[in-house]
Amino acid sequence: MFITTTPVLKARVKQRYADFIVEEIYVENGKEQMCKVEKFTTPFGERSETKLVVPKNTEEKEHLILELEKINTDTNTAIALLSRGLGLSKSRIGYAGMKDKRAITAQRISIYQAEVERIERFGAKGLGLANPSWGERLELGDLKGNQFTLTLRDISEEKKEIKKIVDEFAKQIKSGIPNFFGTQRFGGKRNVTHRVGKLLLQENFKDAVMLYLTETFEEEKPDIKNARINLAKTLDFRQALREFPNACRSEKAILNELAKSPTDFMKAFSALQKKTRYLFVHAYQSYLFNKIITKRIELFGDKALAKIDGDVLSEDKNPTTILPGFETTFSEGKAGEIEKQIMKEEKVSFKTFRVHSLSELSSKGNQKEISLFPKDFKLLEIMDDEFNEGKRAIKISFFLSKGNYATTALRELIKEEIF
């Protein structure tokens, strides 16, 4: 379901890691700063490896701030690699935002009571550390947003038509596009995270854990897919622990507990990192949010993002809707009717979001703007696609405030879901 009326621009997203560049923007001393991608956009033979030198901690700050550049590595894996390589607990590493895996990204991290010599010696494939300074711990949300520089490939249209479509698209999105949570919020093609979240909220830990462990999708790697299928058939957790590859860190953490206590599914789920455990409930809230926006589009078409009767407005005077939680209340008027309809269809209430047996999963809820406004959307270049003979590629850039997805903007341009 799309708001923009530009023709379909069928394109391939993330064909190469360098096609998706994400640079974190933050504010320091009242001035915007950017974590720049540099290491992994330079050809391997041309990289100059500058030795990391940590400055003296003259103000005796407890946290070392670094810029982390990574390629084809998700944020959780990067933190795990840092934790092992530096010999410290993951809880001592802070960061402001999650970044895409299949991409080259740069973001800030903080390390509590950092051992300077080990950090200066640290090296890991796909990771780079730069620009050390001393400061305060970083928490999720301590950023302004992200700058995206994206290359879309395998485009059939001629350059003149491409420019016409993209220029018109840039005009239309100034009025806003649906602020959908991207498919990665729901586990990508496996599409499982929000479904697990709903079961957790219902305190059905057994079904939640088994769904997470056994759900497959068509293109999943054969060794992982077979391990999931075998577990669903045998329910043999010890065997599954041997069969799941080491890359499945979360699954193996759960299975390790189930191998010891085969009926304690709540304890097994608790083996996941705290930040990971939260993601499942957040995913279900996001799913409900997406359903509410979809219903508005069904009812109001291209007027769906405009203010309707009962809308709660943000500080920027834009309509919002609920990310449901146990302290949430429905909007008034027509906006509230839509929210109530979606909650009724899902057979959940606000009380569902208070989890008595595992209180950390409980969520108070929030409001979120229903429109997304990509800023400074630019068509940087149209070129022949060197990786797809006879096709064109485009390079675009734009800024999104924190908590928003680049794929949400791209799906409106290419008119299809992006995984």
Image: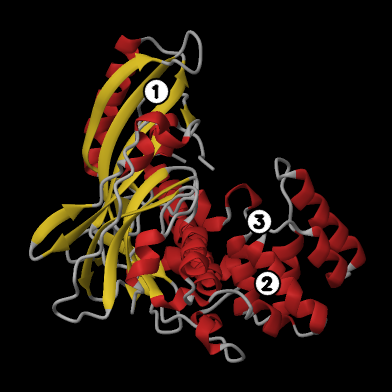
Q: Position of residue 273 (x, y in %)?
A: 55, 74
Disc with the residue nearer the chain's start (3 vs 1): 1
**Within-10-Å neighbours for mark 3: few <14, some 14–19, many 20+:** few
In the image: residue 218, left or right of residue 363:
right
Q: Quadrant of the C terminus?
A: top right
In the image: residue 251, left or right of residue 395:
right
Location of residue 239 by image quarter: bottom right
| Residue matched to label 2 | 253
Query: Which numbered tag is attached to residue 279?
Result: none
- Kindly state the secondary structure of the residue where label 1 is placed: loop
Looking at the rendered structure, the kind of residue marked 3 is Ala
| Residue matched to label 1 | 7
| Residue matched to label 3 | 247
Looking at the rendered structure, the kind of residue marked 1 is Pro
Residue 410 seen by the camera: yes
- Kindly state the secondary structure of the residue where label 2 is placed: helix
